[in-house]
Structure formats: structure tokens, C-alpha cells
């Protein structure tokens, strides 16, 4: 639940607050649980709803986060700075997606839930999950193409270049 909230909101404090709201809602609604799905699916749906509520409220009163200072990072034998930069780039790219695309991508591609589980959590059809993921992945591929092939000038052909026969 924590990972879903954190990846959806991309802010630990907001995720913690959303998770607390979600569990309070789950406690209050526990008597209404109909056992038509697994408890975890039901709880994840409540967490996703709490996160989406926070996103909507935040859009009404936008704020600018302070940059991280980078202090107190653990020493690691691998290139932790490059990994951190990659995570930041990916988080920023996810942030550019509309919420209706970001939530399915986080649940399916990052958290590893199936399309059917994600559809139940989000309260949408499986086909909708698939199409939102496909559109979101296409946008992410354009934004993050440089991570896969840093030397290529244009990593993902646009629809215009495909029509003109370029990008082959």
C-alpha cells in the first residue's frame, strides 16, 4: 500500500497522509466490505482513491517542493548518484503524465499488479487500463528514450517521421 501511495504521489509526506486517510476510510467502511474481491484489492482501491483525492486538492492549491540537499546518502559500491539521477528523471517523466495514465502505469509496470487487479483497484474496465498504459508508455518512451540509447538524437520516431518513412 505504501509503495502504491508513494509512487502515485511522489512525495513521502503526502503518501503517508494519504495512506493514513485510506486506512481510516477502510476502518469506517469495513462493515460494508462485500467480499466480491480480495481484501487487498479493496484496500488498494481505497489507497488509490485517497491518493487521487490528494492530487485533486493539491491541484487546487499548487506548491513547489524544495530541492533535496543530497546529504546523508548511504555509501554504496555501485554508482548510487547515477541511479538517483535516473530515478529523478523517471519520477519527473511520470509526473508529466496525466493522472489517469500515471496511476495504471504505476500499478501495472512499477508495482507488478495484473491488468485485471488494476482495473478493479481503479474502478475502470481492463481495456481502459491497457489503453491508458499504452498511451502513457508511448509518452514515457519519448521522454525517457535517452536513457536507453544516449547517443541517438531521436530515440522514438514521431508519427510524422513514421509517415514520412524516417526513423527506420
Image (cartoon, grey):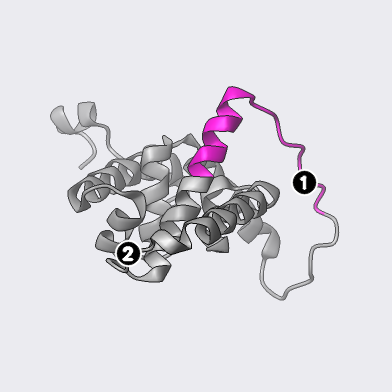
109 lies left or right of 62 = left
Relative image position of residue 1 (x, y in whole percent):
52, 63
What element does badge 2 sit on?
A: loop
Res 143 quadrant in image: top left
Q: Residue at x 27, y 32 (%)?
A: 158
Which residues are the magenta region?
A: 51-70
The magenta stretch spans residue 24: no
Q: Residue at x 25, y 61 (%)?
A: 116
Q: Residue at x 37, y 39 (%)?
A: 100
Relative image position of residue 47 (x, y in whole percent):
50, 54
The magenta stretch spans residue 58: yes
Q: Residue 34: give its label.
A: 2
129 lies left or right of 95 = left
Relative image position of residue 77 (x, y in whole percent):
71, 76
Query: Which residue was labeled with disc 1?
Result: 68
Q: Is residue 112 visible?
A: no
Q: Dot 1: few (<14), some (14–19), or many (≥20) neighbours within 10 Å?
A: few
N-term-proximal mark, 1 vs 2 = 2
Q: CA distance from mark 1 to mark 2?
A: 44 Å
Q: How many marks?
A: 2
Amino acid at each position: 500500500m505504501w509503495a502504491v501511495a508513494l509512487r502515485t504521489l511522489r512525495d513521502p509526506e503526502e503518501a503517508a497522509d494519504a495512506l493514513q486517510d485510506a486506512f481510516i476510510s477502510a476502518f469506517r467502511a469495513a462493515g460494508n466490505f462485500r467480499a466480491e474481491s480480495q481484501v487487498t484489492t479493496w484496500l488498494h482501491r481505497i489507497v488509490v482513491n485517497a491518493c487521487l483525492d490528494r492530487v485533486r486538492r493539491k491541484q487546487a492549491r499548487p506548491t513547489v517542493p524544495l530541492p533535496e540537499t543530497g546529504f546523508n546518502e548511504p555509501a554504496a559500491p555501485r554508482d548510487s548518484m547515477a541511479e538517483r539521477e535516473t530515478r529523478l528523471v523517471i519520477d519527473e517523466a511520470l509526473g508529466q503524465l496525466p493522472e489517469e495514465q500515471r496511476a495504471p502505469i504505476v500499478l501495472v509496470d512499477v508495482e507488478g499488479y495484473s491488468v485485471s487487479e488494476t482495473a478493479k483497484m481503479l474502478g475502470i474496465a481492463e481495456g481502459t487500463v491497457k489503453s491508458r498504459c499504452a498511451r502513457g508508455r508511448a509518452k514515457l518512451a519519448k521522454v525517457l528514450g535517452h536513457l536507453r540509447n544516449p547517443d541517438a538524437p531521436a530515440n522514438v520516431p514521431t508519427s510524422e517521421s513514421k509517415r514520412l518513412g524516417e526513423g527506420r
